[in-house]
Image: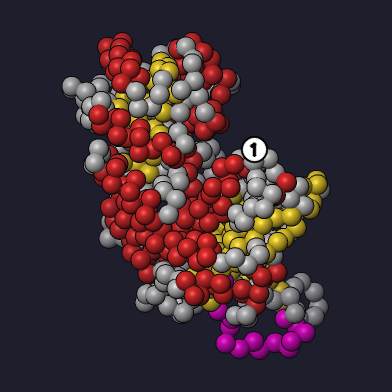
Amino acid sequence: MTNPNPLLDEADRERVAPPCVLVVFGASGDLAARKLLPALARLASRHALPSSFSVVGVARSELSDDEFRDRARKAAPDAGPAWEELCGSFRFVAGEYDHPDTFARLHEALDTLDRERGTGANRVHYLATPPSTFGEVVEALGANDLNRPATGGQFARVVIEKPYGRDLDSARELDRRVHAVFDESQIYRIDHYLGKETVQNLLALRFANAIFEPIWNRRYVDHVQITVAEALGVEHRGSFYEQAGALRDIVQNHVMQVLSLTLMEPPATMDAQGIRDEKVKALRAVEILDPLDVGTETVRAQYDAGWVEGEPAAGYRSEDGVDPESRTETFVALRLDVDNWRWAGVPVYIRTGKRLPKRVTEVAMQFNAVPHLPFLARQARGLGPNALVLRIQPDEGITLRFGAKVPGQSFAVRTVSMDFLYGAAFAEETAEAYERLLLDAFIGDPTLFIRSDEVDQAWRICDPILGAWQQDESPLARYAAGTWGPKDADRLLERDGRHWRNP
């Protein structure tokens, strides 16, 4: 199908969705309003969605077609005429996710769109429902023959949001239920971090540049730090967060995805199978913590009242929906080792938390110190270690930190930064993560989605930590909102003669 926008290059012209219907379960919820509908609007505005495309929303809320269309327009009020026209074709089905009447009306809506819009009997089902309903919705899709395209169609796919299970056993049970209905090739487990440009740029940085790959190993790298920091608290999600915590919410998915891309070997082919094979191999090389070592290799903590960005912030236990005696962690720091040829002896330090000083996600690779400094100590007081820093958010880019002479008559060396900023280097507008991933799901490109064995391996790393924490009745560490976490997290590195970067 030809893209009518002449400003798009040849590669972008090929990335146009085929005829299909996106069926959004949980269409009246927050995720649809904040992420999915705006992403679709952006795709429509750049002509990446054909006229033979539409959306059917399914939810328990009692909405008419027109009310759902109005919600879609309000989710992207400045999207332009293409979005306005597309919204006019949307349908809404109200009902329980496992009730036959709901699916009878869904079939009717899909058949109508196939006739009126030419959507080709192709379906992409998006599960934007609470995780507890994932298995129920998938089984209902199978029971109502929606796990395959209608007559004349080419595909039926399912996109499943995180979290994919609460632990290893529940993830495997969900996988069993999903695989009873859909083949693995039809399943798109989504993690929006993989849609971020800088995360994808890890592949380009490593495998398109001869200057980086030779030093991307234990001979030159001292250690790796991954930081995922949020200035916000739990906001209105206190009840959800009580059931999740930082390890489940961030480490098991976002962090493990970034970690695998950082550590992976060069893939044999730069396609979905080649990249995902190497990601799984990288996660398999991460040493599983013995429950007896969890107490020394991990730190969990909860934020108290403090100040964030100049504003007072309440403590976690004062948030709506949070148990006043809660033991849910809002901060996690851990040290992991990697047992393979490339990374043996290089520790990976991870920290993530809420109510930290600022919002930032980055991967920092700190290199070994030079074997000998031929300068006087006073000449190199401002000199720190070399580092390569990939900033994933909010200011996407890459920083290389190295030593340089300070201008002046005397000789002094200090660390300086060489920065690459996406916004300054490229005129092209960066696609939002959901925009990229939705289009990939329509096209059928699973590269940036998570395979079954990858989910399993990520849970195998996190599960012993959760289990040990559940047995540990000692008080959680505390940290004031607006700080970089508890002192215990600093000591995790200090005992190795290292310290956390200041992002």
User: Would residue 50 appear left or right of 79 to someone viewing this image?
Assistant: left
Whether residue 132 is situated above or below residue 340 in the rendered picture = above
Relative image position of residue 435 (x, y in whole percent) = 46, 35
The magenta region covers 364-380
Q: Disc count in the image?
A: 1
Q: Residue at x 28, y 47 (%)?
A: 176
The answer to which quarter of the image holds residue 54 is top left
Circle 1 packing at 10 Å, graded few (<14), some (14-19), many (20+), is few
| Closest to the observer, 119 or 351 | 351
The kind of residue on which mark 1 rests is: His
Q: Residue at x 49, y 16 (%)?
A: 62
Q: Which residue is mark 1?
A: 236
Label 1's element? Answer: loop
Relative image position of residue 59 (x, y in whole percent) = 44, 23
Q: Is residue 94 shown to the viewer in this render?
A: yes
The answer to which quarter of the image holds residue 162 is top left
User: Would residue 449 appear left or right of 298 to someone viewing this image?
Assistant: left
**Magenta includes 373?**
yes
Relative image position of residue 23 (x, y in whole percent) = 37, 26
Relative image position of residue 482 (x, y in whole percent) = 74, 55
Q: Residue at x 80, y 45 (%)?
A: 311
User: Would residue 316 appear left or right of 214 to someone viewing this image?
Assistant: right
| Closest to the observer, 38 or 211 | 38
**Magenta includes 167?**
no
The furthest residue to the left: 151
Where does the C terminus fall, quadrant-wise?
A: bottom right
| Closest to the observer, 96 or 206 | 96
Q: Residue at x 25, y 37 (%)?
A: 181
